[in-house]
Amino acid sequence: MMEVAYVCEWEKRPKSTHCPSIPLVCAWSCRNLVAFTTDLKNDDDDKDVSHMIHIIDTEHPWDVFSINSGHTEVISCLEWDQSGSKLLSADGDGQIKCWSMSDHLVNSWESILSSSLDGDPIVALSWLHNGVKLALHVEMSGSTNFGEKFSRVKFSPSLTLFGGKPMEGWLAVTVSGLVTVSLLKPGGALLTASESLCRLRGRVALADIAFTGGGNIVVAATDGSSSSPVQFYKVVVSVVSEKCRIDTELLPSLFLRCTTDPLRREKYPAVTHLKFLTRENSEQVLLCASNQSGSIVECWSLRKEGLPVNNIFQHRSPVGEKQPTILKWRILTTTNDLERVSAVALPKLPISISNTDLKVASDTKFCPGLGLALAFHDGSIQILHRLSLHTMGVFYITSSNSSSQRSGDEPAIKRQRTGGPAVHFKALQFSWTSLALAGVDNHGKLHMLRVSPSMGQVLEMNTTLRHLLFLLEYCMVTGYDWWDVLLHVQPTMVHNLVEKLHEEYMRQNQALQQVLATRIVAVKASLCKLSTATAARACDFHAKLLLIAISSTLKSLLRPHLLSMPEKSPGDRLAEICAKNTDTDIDKVMINLKTEEFVLDGPPLQSLQQLIQWVGDFVLYLLANLPNQGSMVRPGFGFMRDGASLGMLREMLVMIRIWGLLKPGCLPTFTATSDNQDSMQLLFRLLTKLWLCSRDDGPPQDPDESLIDECCLLPSQLLVPSVDWLPVNDGVIVKLQGKHPLRLQFGKVSSLPGGGSSAPLEVFTRSPGCQKMDNLRCLHMGVCPTEESKACTRCGCVTMLRSPNKTNAMKQWEQRWIKNCLCGGLWRRIPSTIS
């Protein structure tokens, strides 16, 4: 049901100033970045406290970036934005800071904006809503249309600019009952305003923020006493005459059920947790009341109810007038007495909770998005159903770091209390697909927990694959990182998942296929790395990402000779002519092209020579290894039947041939055994023959004997280069195949062996003296590079941090990958010694 994937701890346990009543704070972004806080005492001066923010990417948890935040009081809130690229932090002195990546690196952050309400502690914080909301329909999980599985819900942004563009900004609630809004104007300036939640300001101990489909904001607030009402307010933000305006309105309130129960009236005096079930649903709220040793949790729902009319007035009502209605909070369900709750985590997966969706989810045992997590002071975590609050599963961590678990149907086991404070979670966060939990315990350790999609219920393999496939498709459509889904993929599942994912992708319309073209290749590459049987295919998928990128870049250099040309671009015409012309002579194919469209200045062509060289080397490697593609799958095997990719290579060889006539220096360099060998002509002829065997418009055929014979002779005619197929990836995901949790240390690079039992493929091994590659620029960096480099958090692709190029053409290529890698992963800085 739940098990520890890894635990990351500090080499020296920090001296924390946290008392039991002040929780640590943790936040998990859609890009699988986790931020958490610690308060550290200076060894020399106990009054000197550093309020630290630590940021990790889940694939490299040891590579922590620790920020001395500059907050003067305990950090009370952390909030990621919808894109996962900005982080808000707020403290007990009213300071709010906005953090952003420096140079787009996940291990380099800086404060870019801040606002302050001096001396007024922040109790709730949220980014304004951008109006994007999806609903995930479990009922439609068998549909072939992504639009039916993941539908766009009509939802208005909290505030819009001219033209309906959502305005960036954040909203916070203070302990004195103020609501403050900061808006980020297009020029970068900050527009700030504050307003009281109601006329009679009172103390706010806990608050939470949610959004409505109409663009309004709802704030829930309580003074911390269970005998006081939980108040709800509507907040409307607008900009009038370049000034921010806030309007508030009181909504229906509620009293906790436990305070109206004569047996429990005095039992739970304090409200310790107040949360809307989702940030886009202001009509369901979760409340937790506690005493020193226990807690009780209640779930409430806002309902529209008819208002009864006295008989005296009924006959006076106009004919046809509807019965008046009123909004009223009604309790959905409540738990029995529980251990004292230390942290709450709510699901972020926007699963539809219609009756049919809930029934299908129950029948198929699909649980992601339906469970909320409660952490207790005895070290346990319970997953409860978000509507019924019945227990779906229990996990228990002991102080010796061993863990035990049971499903919700098993009886509770009385545990013996050990001496000393129990290890328990102070902060807890679900991942964006609800398949993982990140928890920070009272010793400052970070625990990463797998959460089973079926909550430990036994499923058929096909059902398990369907669940994982459904969530991978969701990540593909939204652009969210799929690392937490990979936690549940076993090596034996990889092949079936890749095939089923491809089948579903091919059923989508052409426009959506174009949008998702590179994303699906990146997902397949991530999956294939999890099994040694499919590792060679991972090489092919990474090569395909680079191939697609180079092809689109080279085609973008082409310009129509006349502006009044037809709607087709030169690149489209090139593809059309190459697809129709099956001639194996490259010069005969060139005759049909308008060579004026290929006329470029010399400098851009020369600066792109390293990319052109990669294309030439890649074609030579594929053809030379065609005879070796037997029963064992080797790198390059995936291209032998991929007519689209072979066609793309063919088009690029034609382009390069034409450019070589204009600027011979841009041509790829081959080492031939004969002086009169026309290498480009030879490669194009063999490539065309291979392409004809795998064209999309006919049944695939095996290469004939004559083609294989010619490819066998190729190494004797041209020197075949070694291709650095795949970057070395030192992430943890491939090491988590076993059931035992990894023991990791912040600041210390993991050197654990991979999860596969068989020896790694030759293509993955690197000798200590081998050349290091810049995988984006296709350059050799030497055996011991001195340049600072960055690596992709997802695939491990390495490239130099600073550009060595001066020409515009190469700078444009580099700018395409300034924020993300080819696979869509984020960049992290790596030391030059291990790059």
Image: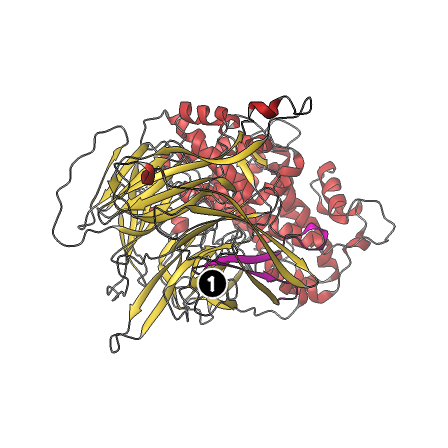
**Residue 165 covered by magenta stretch:** yes
Question: Is the N terminus in the top left, top right, bottom left or bottom right quadrant?
Answer: top left
Q: Quick check: 416 left or right of 433?
A: left
Q: Identify the image's colour scheme: rainbow, by chain, secondary structure or one colour.
A: secondary structure
Up-down: is 47 above or below 508?
Answer: below
Up-down: is 689 above or below 130?
Answer: above
Residue 71 sits in which quadrant?
A: bottom left
**Whole-percent x, y for residue 756 in the image:** 32, 43
Q: Mark 1 belongs to which amino acid? A: Lys
Question: Is the C terminus in the top left, top right, bottom left or bottom right quadrant?
Answer: bottom left
For this rendering, which residue is in front, 384 or 630?
384
Q: Is residue 714 visible?
A: no
**Whole-percent x, y for residue 473 in the image:** 51, 37
Q: Is residue 571 visible?
A: yes
Which residue was labeled with disc 1?
790
Q: Which residues are magenta?
A: 160-188
**Whole-percent x, y for residue 270 in the image:** 31, 49
Q: Residue at x 74, y 58 (%)?
A: 661
**Whole-percent x, y for residue 638 in the image:** 51, 39
Q: Residue at x 47, y 54 (%)?
A: 724
Disc 1, SS: strand
Q: Say few, some or many: other residues with alpha carbon within 10 Å of mark 1 (under 14 / 14 to 19 / 20 or more).
A: many
Q: Quick check: 204 left or right of 322?
A: left
